[in-house]
Amino acid sequence: MKIALMDSGIGLLAAAAAVRRLRPDADLVLSGDPEGMPWGPRTPEDLTRRALAVAEAAAALAPDVLIVACNTATVHALPALRARFEPGIPVVGTVPAVKPAAAGGGRIAIWATPATTGSPYQRRLIEEHAAGVPVTEVPCPGLADAVEHTDAEAAGAAIVAAAARTPADTTAVVLGCTHYELVAERIRAAVRPTGTPPLVLHGSAGAVAAQALRRCGEQPAPQAPARGRLTVLHGGTEATLAAEALAYPEGRLLAAVSPAR
């Protein structure tokens, strides 16, 4: 089994690590666009063009499923990606976890890139899954870029600024950008410094990984003895796992158990 993941940068690490935990034996293809990162400020047309190119590079290696491990790319490019690759290669998008967050009750905040915040896509999610629930949309300018470049100071400043825009009575935060899952505990500490009452964070990586397995007819097998291979593509060219990826536990997990090709 081979599972491909695509993003402009290292935001795909959270979903890739989730897949690796569920199926250690799966071969993984990580297809990125470092020269085009970040995708968020780009026009929908330019983003879609770049996303299709990244996906084409991954598709050339014949994966069983393709994960769009980027919320912004899912918002703008998912229809084009599905039109291009399905039914031959199932395409799984990344949707902010608004539904499970709303089901928990209480006020929720959705942290996302400026491109996703306030988008018709996100507003539809709120209308469909959080009707009657108090929701605050929190744009986080600069956070994804800071996480991508492991700039701890810039990430900290962006997190503090977003926390200041998050109502004090928020009970759950939806991490509406895959990069944010890499700094989830820093977000928790900034929004709820005392830890009382507990703050629930809702990422998408686990659900996306499980959906990818379902789409290719597989089941979780976390105890599988085999170790799948890891292929990294940067702009369609084989590369090594970026040094920045190794700054995060998810990247170190992939490097530790996956012989790179």
Image (cartoon, rainbow, N blue to C red):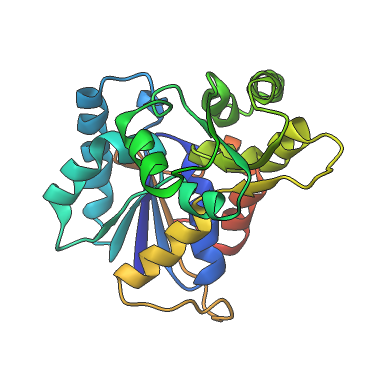
Asked if residue 250 shows in the view, the reply is yes
Q: Which quarter of the image is occupied by the C terminus? A: bottom left
Q: Vertical placement of 85 versus 154: above or below?
A: below
Residue 257 percent location from the top left of the image: 59, 64
Most foreground residue, 229 or 163: 163
Q: Vertical placement of 179 versus 98: above or below?
A: above
Most foreground residue, 208 or 226: 208
Residue at image x 35%, y 66%?
A: 2
Residue 139 located left or right of residue 183:
left
For the image shown, how many numbered marks are present on the structure? 0
Q: Vertical placement of 7 versus 204: above or below?
A: above
Asked if residue 7 shows in the view, the reply is no
Residue 227 percent location from the top left of the image: 52, 72
Residue 155 located left or right of residue 205:
right
Q: Which quarter of the image is occupied by the N terminus? A: bottom left
Displayed quadrant of residue 183: top right
Residue 187 located left or right of residue 192:
left
Residue 232 percent location from the top left of the image: 41, 48
Residue at image x 26%, y 45%?
A: 55
Residue at image x 26%, y 20%?
A: 43
Residue 8 percent location from the top left of the image: 39, 34
